[in-house]
């Protein structure tokens, strides 16, 4: 299973404008090639990292929209 690289995710976030996003939007181009089980595990690891405060400026909205959990980037 691929590992969650917080430094890469933080870099991806810093290029975005503030606002809501789904995790695959910042994961990168390799998302579509992952097995569904890996997507679920990575998504859960990301949610845990957000809730633990490991990604400053990112909050879990607690909502799902368009098939995935919605996060918010404060910028």
Image (cartoon, rainbow, N blue to C red):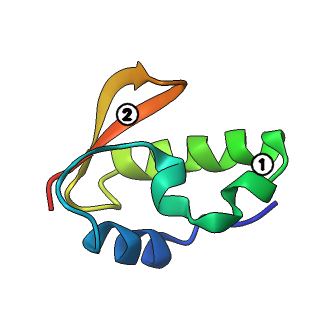
Q: Nearer the viewer, mark 1 or mark 2?
A: 2
Name the disc covering residue 22, or none.
none
Residue 53, horizontal then vertical, whole percent: 29, 54
Which residue is painted at 54% across and 50% down in the image? Answer: 24
Against 50, is 60 above or below? Answer: above
Which residue is painted at 23% across and 62% down in the image? Answer: 56
Against 1, is 14 above or below? Answer: below
64 left or right of 59?
right
Name the disc covering residue 70, or none.
2
Residue position for label 1: 38
69 left or right of 59?
right
Q: For the residue labelled by badge 2, is the local secondary structure a helix, a strand or a loop?
A: strand
Where is the C terminus found, in terms of image quarters?
Answer: bottom left
Where is the N terminus found, in terms of image quarters?
Answer: bottom right
- Is 5 in front, or is 68? 68
User: Label 2: few (<14), some or many (≥20) within 10 Å?
Assistant: some
Residue 46, horizontal then vertical, whole percent: 50, 50
């Amino acid at each position: 299973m691929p590992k969650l690289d917080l430094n890469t995710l933080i870099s991806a976030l810093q290029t975005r404008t503030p606002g809501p996003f789904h995790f695959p939007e910042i994961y990168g181009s390799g998302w579509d090639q992952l097995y569904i089980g890996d997507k679920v595990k990575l998504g859960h690891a990301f949610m845990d990292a957000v809730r633990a405060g490991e990604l400053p400026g990112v909050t879990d909205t607690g909502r799902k929209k368009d098939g995935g959990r919605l996060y918010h980037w404060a910028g």
